Amino acid sequence: MEVILTKTYDDMSNAAAQEIARQIRKKPNSVIGLATGSTPLGTYKELIRLHKDEGLDFSKVITFNLDEYLGLSPTHKESYNFFMWDNLFKHVNINPENVHVPQGLVEDAEEFCHWYEDEIKKAGGIDLQLLGIGSDGHIGFNEPGSSFGSRTRVKTLDEQTIKDNARFFDSIDEVPHFAITMGVGTILEARKIVLVASGDNKAPVCVQFIEGPLTSQVTASALQLHPQAIVILDEKASVQLKRKKYYNWIRDNKHTVKKYLDR
Ligand code: PGA
């Protein structure tokens, strides 16, 4: 796991956007996995800027979102479909046919989950998956206890997640209790993973998933198993890390290592 320590929220967002932009420039028809929540908002803002100012081209990009609340229509203002269009898709030249967000209103959720997994496979698998992290350690809506082998399925939200997300709804009673989410196993199949975390409230969980043991009680710790996982933190989210000096040492020596590798 590569741990990148940045100072501010904007620095974290720009670093994540650069990773995504690099992927899209290298492979214009990249399959990108996307996340919702407040943390990736700055990353999306920077991607929009890169599109407008530097011509970053989304026309061939294919996207798959991690999750959606079960029971919310795609036009509901708190649905993740609405969020993605509002905060990214409508501002860039993405082809709507290439956008995939799980359906919150489905007759047969199980069948839909199989279909979603098949669509990811048909697209050739995810090249880069962007992730946030919940204060309970979840990635997607894989709440504590989710198997590292889990696939896209319906998941019951943890009480903590319901409380955390209540800020977006008029009242806590309106927060759905179920969601469709890619599984931890689905996420781990992405070729590259970029996780962003920001703020004091994420500091305890960041030290747990980066430097603590591998456990399904903190599903983000599964990233320790991934060969190309990059974790980008702002200063507040990184305060409890024990090995900060080493992460910075790696960053400072990156170009020297590259010289050896390029020989
Ligand atoms: P947040 O949510 O970015 O709004 O903190 C993260 C998540 O729950 O994955």
Image (cartoon, grey):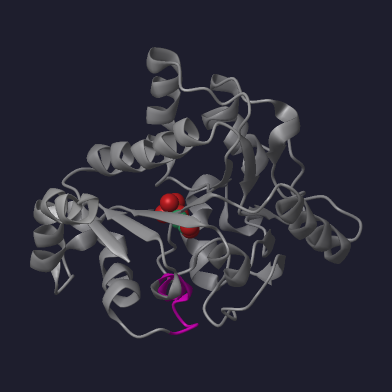
Q: Is residue 148 left or right of residue 181?
A: left
In percent of the image, x 26 and y 54: which residue is there? 233
Q: Looking at the picture, does residue 118 appear above or below residue 86?
A: below
Which of 131/98 is in front?
A: 98
Residue 143, position as x, y percentages in the image: 55, 73
Residue 25, position as x, y percentages in the image: 46, 31
User: Magenta segment, which residues?
Assistant: 215-223
Q: Looking at the picture, does residue 113 appear above or below residue 143?
A: above
Count of all numbered marks drawn on residues in the image: 0
In percent of the image, x 51 and y 57: which residue is there? 191
- Please tell me in which quadrant of the rendered image residue 3 appears: bottom left
In percent of the image, x 40 and y 84: which residue is there? 214
- Please tell me in which quadrant of the rendered image residue 174 appears: bottom right
Query: Is residue 106 shown in magenta?
Result: no
Which of 39/122 is in front?
A: 122
Quadrant the N terminus occupies: bottom left
Q: Name, please, the residue furthest toward the front.
A: 263
Q: Is residue 34 left or right of residue 131?
A: right
Query: Is residue 218 shown in magenta?
Result: yes
Residue 40, position as x, y percentages in the image: 42, 43
Q: Is residue 121 left or right of residue 172?
A: right
Q: Point out the quarter of the image occupied by ligand 1.
A: bottom left
Residue 102, position as x, y percentages in the image: 72, 50
